[in-house]
Image: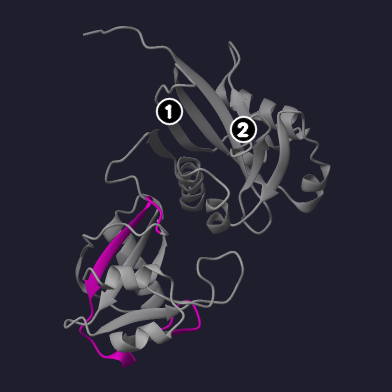
Amino acid sequence: MTGPTALTTSCGALYFTDRHGHPFQLRSARHPDRWQLPGGDSAPGETPWQTALRGAREHLRLDMSDEESTVGRRLLAVLHHAPAADRPLARTGFVFDGGTLDDDRLHRIRLTAEHTDWAVDTLWRWRSRMRPQDHRRLMLVDRARRARTTLYAEHPDTGADAFEGVLVLITTPAHDRVLLNLRDDHPGIAWPGHWAPIGGWREGHESAHDCATREIREEAGITVTALRPLPAPRHPLIADTTTVLHAVYDGPERALVLGEGQAIRLVPREEIPALRTPPYVAHYLAHL
């Protein structure tokens, strides 16, 4: 069975990071609120890989063709964009792993009139610099690279799989104590120096449940029960791409094993207001 012909354009891009693993992007001259990967729309007869190489050559003045044997044409993500008001045709994007831009290559970048700036930053700090939908795609591409796999996504996408991280409020069975982690006081991470719930980025093809279970094991060394989504209104500081869950821990505090951060505790709820915590903590505790 066939239907009306739908026209689709294609594009190709390269995903670079610096030597610290921080994503590299370009600021659009036409839309200053948009940061983009080097690439562009495919010309007639051009493959997405050829488009990606041309994008690096034209937008950065870097010839990556000699790196093909190292990069290996590794496809990280296929991104389908539905037609929009400013773009009447659907578009399918192919993002390839561009490898690492060392300090020498970064210093050799020469921008064209299409872009006004370039930057490298942590995934967390990119969130405040980008539109939410653009940041979600950046996180998906970075997740694909970390897992050495290829991921597919659609925009807009509001399905159960459209998440990139979890936040887990863990309490004792009576909800009278809450598991909190004192985060490292390093720039570029979420809530440095704050007492915060367990949480982290999604890896590979994990479900929200699997992601939460892994993060709890890595950060606290424990097993929890009754892990479920927390039915509460989303706090404005929590991104739409973060799934918030609640779990119960009925074991002893001495069984906690610090895996990340400076300290980990089961904190009595009455002591939490005196701690330095993200504003969303009180919001979600009120909905347990």
Q: In which quarter of the image is residue 253?
A: bottom left
Q: Which of 111 and 251 is in front in this view?
A: 111
Three-letter code for the amino acid on which mark 2 is drawn: His
Relative side of 6 to 123, left or right = left
Give the residues in magenta.
238-263
Mark 1 lies on residue: 81
Residue 214 spot, x, y in % from top left: 34, 66
Three-letter code for the amino acid on which mark 1 is drawn: His
Q: Which of 253 and 156 is in front in this view?
A: 156
Q: How far apart are marks 2 and 1 (CA)?
A: 18 Å
The residue sitting at 65% across, 59% down in the picture is 20
Asked if residue 210 is among those painted magenta in the image, a careful observer would answer no
Q: In which quarter of the image is residue 286?
A: bottom left
Mark 2 lies on residue: 31
Q: Residues within 10 Å of mark 2 (few under 14, many from 20)?
A: few
Asked if residue 245 is among those painted magenta in the image, a careful observer would answer yes
* Contact (Cβ within 8 Å) of mark 2 with mark 1: no
Q: How crowded is mark 1: few (under 14 residues within 10 Å), some or many (20 or more)?
A: many
Secondary structure under badge 2?
loop
Residue 53 spot, x, y in % from top left: 67, 29
Secondary structure under badge 1?
strand
